[in-house]
Image (cartoon, grey):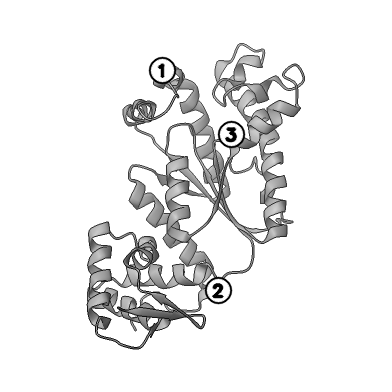
Amino acid sequence: MLKIEKDDKIYPFSKGILARSLLPTGLSIDSIYNIVGDVQQEYKFEEEPVSSAVIQNKVARLLVDKEMVKEKNRYLVSRKFAQIKEPMVILIGGVAGVGKSTVAAELADRLGIQRVIDTDEVREIMRYTLPEDLLPELHKSSFDAGEVVAGPDIKKNVLVGFSRQARMVNRGVRAYIERVAKEGIKTIFNGVHLVPGLMEIEQNNKPAEHFTYLLTLKDEQNHIRRFHSRAEHSYRKANRYTEKMKNIGIIQEYAIERAEESGTTMIENTSLDTTVTQIVDDLIDNLQDKYFHYEKDTTL
């Protein structure tokens, strides 16, 4: 039986563990297990334990042999990502139904990030402590917050109500981020409230290294289909959202404008794998000089 040596300890070779380490490459499950099988075949007759570093180098060489240099870089960076000691925050914004939670969960799985927080969870906590008669916007959904704003301009009401709610919720997010910084934990936040310009984390005294992404979905029919698909696997009724598509569209346009003004990375989330891979690649580009120190397009 093949055994692996890591940190002066011996473990039995696990195809599942090696396959999981390859998730950040963005390869299909079939391709990942083909590589795992090649590694196992290479060392199956080894009587002495093989170091984890040797296995890592073998995986990298196999990827290069298959002309998958970008995938090799993603693999190597993901191996080092967990070793970064500094606190790190990834913020994923976007209106209801664009797939923020799904992207956040997949990204966390690929990068081994254990903490994922939805801003709606923060809002729920704040709702229990702050009465509705004091802050009515907080007690509405993001696309309904404008109902408590008096005025003849519906679009303006939607944005005033939403921005008030977002600023309040983001104070709670800021408190979470400061806690993350103290604990030194990597965390992903996702939520409609994470609009560029409405987050206090964008101030110069940021407590943790952070990266912000705005997910969009500009095809309204595709967006509506997402709500119906989501409703099949949850208690969230599709019509609650589809009846408010105009308001959701207004908020999305506003978020896009703010993202363009601030230079925030925007991603049209039509494919889960493509979106997550784009975020991984962007993290690599931004972190390589500080933490990884390798040439992106070189081979082993």
In the rendering, at what x and y percent does residue 135 appear?
Answer: 73, 22
Q: Which residue is mark 3?
A: 120
Q: Secondary structure at mark 3?
A: helix
- The answer to whether residue 89 is seen in the rendering is no
| Mark 1 vs 2, N-terminal side | 1
Circle 3/circle 1 CB separation < 8 Å: no
| Mark 3 vs 2, N-terminal side | 3
Q: Which residue is mark 2?
A: 291
What amino acid type is highlighted by mark number 3?
A: Asp
Q: Which residue is located at x 70 percent, y 40 percent?
A: 172
The residue at the far front in this view is: 1
What amino acid type is highlighted by mark number 1?
A: Asn
Instruction: For marks 3 and 1, give the CA distance.
Output: 20 Å
Q: Which residue is located at x 38 percent, y 71 percent?
A: 73
What amino acid type is highlighted by mark number 2?
A: Tyr
Quarter of the image for residue 32 reads bottom left
Is 169 displayed left or right of 222 in the figure? Answer: right
Residue 239 - label: 1
Q: Which residue is located at x 61 percent, y 15 percent?
A: 147
Instruction: For marks 3 and 2, give the CA distance.
Output: 33 Å
